[in-house]
Image (cartoon, helix red, strand yellow):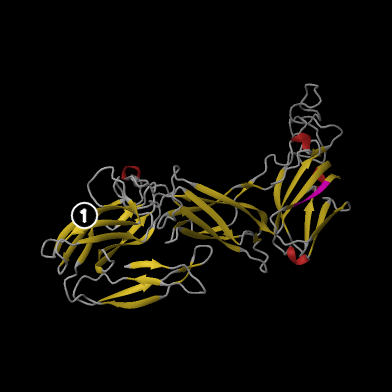
Amino acid sequence: SIQSVMPAQNNRSDAIILNNNTTNVDQTAIVQFTVYNLQGLPVSSPEQIIIMKGVTAQPVVQLTADKIELKVSTSNDTNENNRDALDSGGPSEPTGTDANRVTLTVNINLSGLNSNEQVKLILTSTDLNGMFTDDANENGEIGSLGRREITLNADGGGNLNTVRQAAYWASTRSGNFVITAEVQRQNGQVLGQASLNIVQRPGNPTQIFVTADPPRLAVSTHPTEPTQARIIASLLDTNNNPVPNWWVFFQIQPVYVNLNPDTTDNGGRGESWKIPEVSDGVLNPFAVRTDAGGVAVSSLRSINTCQPVELVCIVDADNEGNLDSGDRPENSIQTVYYVPIVNVSAIVDYNSATRNIIINVTPASALPPNTAIWVCRYAVYWNQQQPTNDQYAVDNDGDGRFDEDPIGDADGDGNRNDDGDGQTDEDGPETLPPVYYRVTVDQPGTLVVPAFPLGSRETGIVNVRIFFYTKDGTMVRVRVDQVTR
């Protein structure tokens, strides 16, 4: 049994291991130490084989228990009526209202004592908030934390042959602990000792914390930057104990492309109207069980698009491995797929038929080919039902003329066949709501965004916004106002 493990100091951690082999046969035991890093992940698990020698004589003290796995308690109160099992009815094991309580049985066979000598039975736990009572059945008894002494009397012949029962309650802390029963004379002489291991299991997970390492990823087209991250979820119960062997689900959930809308644009509507929600990236695995430290890890790989991403971790409430609508708790973090730009500039090529906006970044290597950048395009007064002076118009029917038969009879003359060709409502509204799309880089360091991708079929004035996300997680928005064609 592991009696104690000391915190590491000067690269060393000591453990005290007791031999509780009660047979007369030598037994082999393997002791394994697991070392965790700051993220709670195991990095080393060395093993040591030791021999537990068998006993050659009947032990004078024997300690047994009705169970060795307990549920942690709701409190560290000394009144047994105020110390209940945490989440006694939930899927975490063990279950039951008395799952945090164990009955201890101590067998003592002593001789050679003085006539009617008083000795002490001392019960201790390496959990200093584990509670003992000296009566296993009394209701409402006030217990002792971590240690309890019980006085016993030898008979007139100096013999002490008795069976004594006591009770032990788990504390709020989970882990492996050792309970020891020791018989001492009044002068402190140890006459016999026995120990056993107990395991105090945590309750159901009620808290989940999520981190990403590294916290941000470059787009997948930029191999010199990190493009893959570990997503780390840590599960805790109500007592802040880590919860091992529990299912956690990882998801990428949609996020608005624009995290910083400018409410001065578009009559106060800003640039967040009808922004597509994206959930791009590769997340694997989807479902993971927590390790001994209550940690589950998945892997996120970026794609070629510069954009924000939200990562959500959901706890499987019933721990059955299936994602249901009632699963909780959940938590999330946001990250971005970034490009490591230093500077960015924009010019409009008015000689091009589509009025290309040329975006150049420094360094050029920050924007390699096949990198996709989000773009927003809209008419200056798109929020007005009837724009004036052809602020924007589109030749919807492709006949080279604009607004012959606008939908809804814009001029109010009651005639929807304004050009007399026998067809009505050929051309759509003269407005252009915000349209979001992705433009792909062809040349290193340069992004070409057509302000009028339909060329001759469009006329008027449009605004264009180009969105970059940088390594520090912020958005760089390039504004190009009132490009005219």
* First to last magenta residue range: 476-480
How many numbered marks does the figure carry? 1
Compared across the picture, whether 213 is left or right of 473 comes to left
Foreground residue among 453 and 239 = 239
Foreground residue among 421 and 197 = 197
The quarter holding residue 281 reads: bottom right
Q: Which residue is mark 1?
A: 165
The quarter holding residue 473 reads: bottom right
Q: Say if residue 123 shows up in the picture.
A: yes
Q: Say if residue 430 shows up in the picture.
A: no
The quarter holding residue 217 reads: bottom right
Q: Residue at x 73, y 60 (%)?
A: 441
Compared across the picture, whether 299 is left or right of 184 comes to right
Q: Give the amino acid at mark 1.
A: Gln
- In this rendering, the answer to whether 104 lies above or below 413 is below
Query: Which residue, as the protein is rendered here, is positioned at the far left?
Result: 157
- Residue 88 lies, in percent from the top left, at 33, 46
Foreground residue among 333 and 8 = 8
- Residue 8 lies, in percent from the top left, at 48, 70
Position of the C terminus, as image quadrant, is top right
Q: Residue at x 10, y 65 (%)?
A: 157
The kind of secondary structure element at disc 1 is strand
Compared across the picture, whether 305 is left or right of 290 comes to right
Q: Residue at x 46, y 52 (%)?
A: 240
Q: Residue at x 71, y 60 (%)?
A: 339
- Residue 71 lies, in percent from the top left, at 34, 52
Position of the N terminus, as image quadrant, is bottom left
Q: Residues within 10 Å of mark 1 (few under 14, many from 20)?
A: some
